[in-house]
Amino acid sequence: MPASSANATTASRSLPDGVELISAGGLQVASEGGLVLANGRALPLSAREYAVLLTLIRRRGRIVSREELYRLVWGGDLRAGDRSVDVYVSKLRNKLETQLPGERFIHTHVRFGYRLDAEPAEGQPWAGSDAPASGSGARAPGDSQPLPAERAHRQRVGRPRF
C-alpha cells in the first residue's frame, strides 16, 4: 500500500464515530474537526477556509452561489460589495493547487457561484479515481471536444472561465 493511502487509511480509522471523510480526487475532508488531507498528508487550513471547503465538498458537482456560501459559512446575509467569499475561495485554490498540482478543485461560474469537482489541471492527463468509465457516455474531464450544448452556449456567451 502506498504511503499516502496508508496515511489516509490511518486517518480514517482514527476519526471519531459519525465523522466521515468526503473525497474528491486526491482531496479528503473530514465532516467534522477540521481534518483535510491532500494525497494522504494533512493540509493546514484556517477555520473559515475549512468551513468554505466543507460546504463546497458537501455540495460537490453543484454550483453554490456566493450568497449561499456566505449564509452557510458566515451565518448572515452577504452585503453588497463584500468580497469575503472570493478572498477565501482564492486562498483555498492556492493551497489546494500547491499541494495537489495535477488537479483543480474549485471552479468559478461567473454570475452563478462556485463548484467543487476534481478535474485535471490545465494540460494534465486525467488520472483521478473519479474519471468516468469508458463507454459510460460521459465525457472525460479535459476532453477537448465540447458537447453540442456547450458549443451553443460558447457561441452565445463566449468561452467559459472555470
Image (cartoon, rainbow, N blue to C red):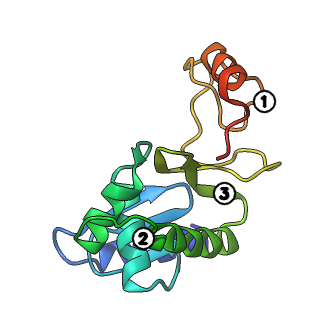
Left or right, 57 with respect to 137, comes to: left
Q: CA distance from mark 3 to mark 1?
A: 17 Å
Tell me the amino acid under the disc marked 3: Glu
Q: CA distance from mark 1 to mark 2?
A: 35 Å
Point out residue 142 in the picture as x, y percentages from the top left corner: 72, 38
Q: Residue at x 22, y 71 (%)?
A: 75
Q: Residue at x 35, y 80 (%)?
A: 34
Q: Is residue 51 above or below residue 159?
A: below
User: Which mark sits nearer the N-terminus, 3 or 2?
Assistant: 2
User: Which mark sits nearer the N-terminus, 1 or 2?
Assistant: 2
Q: Is residue 123 above or below residue 78?
A: above
SS class, disc 3: strand
**Residue on which the image places disc 3:** 103
Point out residue 45 in the picture as x, y percentages from the top left corner: 47, 83
SS class, disc 1: loop
| Mark 2 Cα shell of 10 Å, populated few (<14), some (14-19), many (≥20) | few
Foreground: disc 1 or disc 2: 1
Tell me the amino acid under the disc marked 2: Thr
Q: Can you tell which quarter of the image residue 23 is in?
A: bottom left
Given contact means CB atoms under 8 Å apart, are the residues at marks 3 and 1 in contact?
no
In the foreground, 100 or 76: 76
